[in-house]
């Protein structure tokens, strides 16, 4: 089952933390995907942020283990997105 996508303003690791926390109560999380989307179009997923220390820390604190698929994307042209972008978070739970 997939939890409906949730959107968060891009505020770094806090947004990812909120995203993970929002789906933990729905069941056992098996996958979390975080993408950046402009308000008018889907952003091209060109750079992974899964090796970002802050993101890894957030995922770890959420209790997700190595069996969990976590994918994060950022726009290659912008490492610090502004208000024109939101995080789109989708999680699969069992």
Image: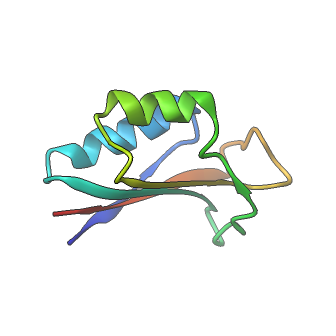
Report the residue at 72% width, 69% height from top.
44
Report the residue at 71% width, 42% height from top.
82
Q: Nearer the viewer, residue 67 or 91?
A: 67
Q: Nearer the viewer, residue 81 or 69?
A: 69
Report the residue at 75% width, 63% height from top.
46
Colour scheme in use: rainbow
Q: Nearer the viewer, residue 5 or 91?
A: 91
Rendered-image quadrant of the C terminus: bottom left
Q: Is residue 55 above or below residue 36?
A: above
Left or right of 65, for residue 79: right
Rendered-image quadrant of the N terminus: bottom left
Q: Residue 83 appears at what percent x and percent y?
A: 66, 44
Q: Residue 2 appears at what percent x and percent y?
A: 26, 69
Q: Residue 58 appears at what percent x and percent y?
A: 44, 30
Report the residue at 66% width, 72% height from top.
41
Q: Is residue 48 above or below residue 41?
A: above
The mark total stands at 0
Q: Residue 61 appears at what percent x and percent y?
A: 35, 27
């Amino acid at each position: 089952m997939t939890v409906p996508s949730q959107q968060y303003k891009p505020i770094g690791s806090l947004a990812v933390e909120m995203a993970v926390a929002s789906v933990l109560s729905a069941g056992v999380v098996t996958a979390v995907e975080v993408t950046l989307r402009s308000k008018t179009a889907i952003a091209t997923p060109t750079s992974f942020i899964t090796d970002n220390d802050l993101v890894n820390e957030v995922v770890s604190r959420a209790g997700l283990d190595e069996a969990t698929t976590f994918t994060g994307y950022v726009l290659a042209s912008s490492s610090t997105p502004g208000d024109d972008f939101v995080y789109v978070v989708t999680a699969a739970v069992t």
